[in-house]
Image (tube, grey):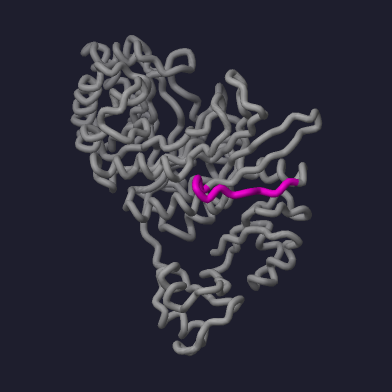
Amino acid sequence: MQIHVVLPGQSLFGIAQAYNTTVNDLVEANEIPNPNRLVVGQTLVIPIIGSFYWVQPGDSLWTIGQKFGVSYQQLAEINRIPLIRPLQVGTRLYIPPTPKTMREFNGYIEPRGTVTPTLENYAREAAPYLTYLAPFSYEVLRDGNLREPPLNQFPQIAAMNRNVLMMVITNKEDDQFSDELGKVILNDIQVQEKLLNNIVATAKKQGFRDIHFDFEYLRPEDRQAYNNFLRKAKARFAKEGWLLSTALAPKTSADQKGKWYEAHDYRAHGEIVDFVVIMTYEWGYSGGPPMAVSPIGPVRKVLEYAVTEIPSQKIFMGQNLYGYDWTLPYKEGNVAKAVSPQQAIQLAAQNNVPIQYDFRSEAPFFDYTDENGNNHRVWFEDARSIQAKFNLIKELNLRGMSYWKLGLSFPQNWLLIQENFIVQKN
């Protein structure tokens, strides 16, 4: 497959001709929301085997081969180019596909009150590309009981697609993570025993095979208590043959301050649990100033620290499937609107503005003015930003990627999973 960035004056017909494919194939693969009004800077994933590259000034077969992980001799042979002939700028070269590696993928899905048919359809569409399907969430009560989320057809969808059904358990009260609830869970032995009994009974009933603790905003003094609780849970669930996993805040050092960070002991979790999901997103968030949701620099910094504490094959990179639309100028207290990548493209098309790309953040953005004269900035995800994250997964040899959350349309993501990896099915 190839990632193509739309240039001024280009049409789907011309792009399809350039890559020896059809307009219909481009529209279907990308679920293009604006086929008759492409946006400059919009990305398209071209559904072809391998890719094409146009020679740039200073290129040689050797440098191009290094860029794509192909030997210069193979490039010359495939493209029928003599090894000793200089390359002409603008020459189109065919780049053969490189071998794929196996990775795991998780998708959280969050029903809010009820499971709508639309949300179930999103789960069905994503499940073929997932290893784990994670309904969010079972909320722990102060007496050790569980408040269950609606599951509807999620267990059946997981079974049909060979997904491990993940039981996500949170310390949430009134829709907020609670340090006081965390204190009760982690320090009251009777509550713990009741909770573990309830988890086992529920997991057996629903078919969960991974138990996933997403305990956040814990008191710093509960760090060791959380580690001890996980050891107890691991011993209990191992008897059932289940996996144990945790969600971790994005830290860059062991002693990072703040209630979101201090109780999350990377080294201990790496020793105790089967894998972790590191929540490498929300640098740009709904209540903050406009910026990329998961800029590559901060993401890399977190993960490079993580692999010094946790085996890389136990680490999932967290990835957002959404962006935000901020009203400018940003004022504290204002809340940005969440948008899917498809909605972002539609906004750019409707307002006739180009999509720009911040190569430092590896993220697309654009500005527009609404019908009331308000200025906006939108940061979102596209094929380039996701490919940058996939490259980082390969570089750091991570276990895979975990998505927060299913329900926002981003078809290019699933295309690029197929291009880069073989999805592990358990």
Q: Residue at x 61, y 22 (%)?
A: 331
Q: Quadrant of residue 401?
A: top left
Residue 322 picture location, percent across and down: 56, 38
Q: Residue at x 58, y 41 (%)?
A: 380
Q: Residue at x 62, y 26 (%)?
A: 330
Q: From which residue to which does the magenta span run?
A: 353-362
Residue 31 picture location, percent across and down: 66, 52
Residue 358 picture location, percent across and down: 56, 47
Task: Reply above or below: 389 against 115.
Answer: below
Residue 279 visible in the shown view: yes
Relative placement, left or right, of 371 versus 102 is: right
Please identify the dominant SS of the magenta region: loop
Q: Is residue 380 magenta?
A: no
Q: Residue at x 59, y 49 (%)?
A: 357
Q: Residue furthest front?
A: 58
Residue 13 picture location, percent across and down: 74, 66
Q: Residue furthest right?
A: 371
Relative placement, left or right, of 101 versus 332 is: left
Residue 132 visible in the shown view: no
Q: How many marks?
A: 0
Task: Reply above or below: 340 against 387.
Answer: above
Task: Reply above or below: 137 against 85.
Answer: above
Q: Nearer the viewer, residue 254 or 197?
A: 254
Task: Reply above or below: 24 against 238.
Answer: below
Q: Quadrant of residue 56?
A: bottom right
Q: Nearer the viewer, residue 304 or 48?
A: 304
Image quarter in which the N terminus is found: bottom right
